[in-house]
Image: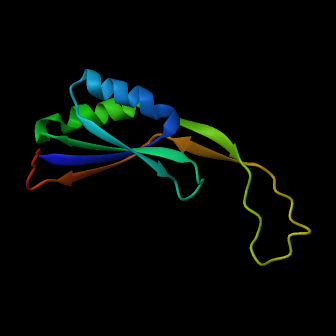
Amino acid sequence: MKLILAVVQDQDSNRLSAQLVKHNFRATKLASTGGFLKSGNTTFIIGTEDIRVDKCLQIIKENCQSRDQLVAPVSPMGGNADSYVPYPVEVAVGGATVFVLPIEHFHHF
């Protein structure tokens, strides 16, 4: 048995959730916040049999696309902010960060 933790951008979470249900994967959704962009994410917690891990990863990959986004940089802390001009920076966001962990026991009460 495996535990899959998938951190996805909020824009992809509803589509991913619908596809997981369609393919009979049970998942718990948690609201989370990314540390770098401070933007909303959704963390999916999915328990599945070893033989279904590849199918789950395929569903995640197909439903969580990477996209470019303009982000205003944070002003420097403790420095002289008078000469600081915050130009937006384009960064790639989205996609999914996925962890697959072995599970020793699973109990459902």
Residue 4 location in percent, x, y?
A: 26, 46
**Which quarter of the rendering shows the C terminus?**
top left
Residue at the extreme right of the image, as rendered = 82
Residue 109 shows up from this direction: yes
Residue at the spot 43% in from the left edge and 29% down from the top edge: 14
Is 77 located above or below residue 70 in the figure? below
Residue 15 located left or right of residue 53: right
Is 100 located above or below residue 94 in the figure? below
Q: Nearer the viewer, residue 11 or 54?
A: 11
Q: How is the image coloured?
A: rainbow
Is 97 located above or below residue 60 in the figure? below
Residue at the spot 77% in from the left edge and 49% down from the top edge: 88
Is 7 located above or below residue 19 in the figure? below
Residue at the spot 36% in from the left edge and 30% down from the top edge: 17
Residue 62 located left or right of residue 52: right
Residue 61 located left or right of residue 2: right
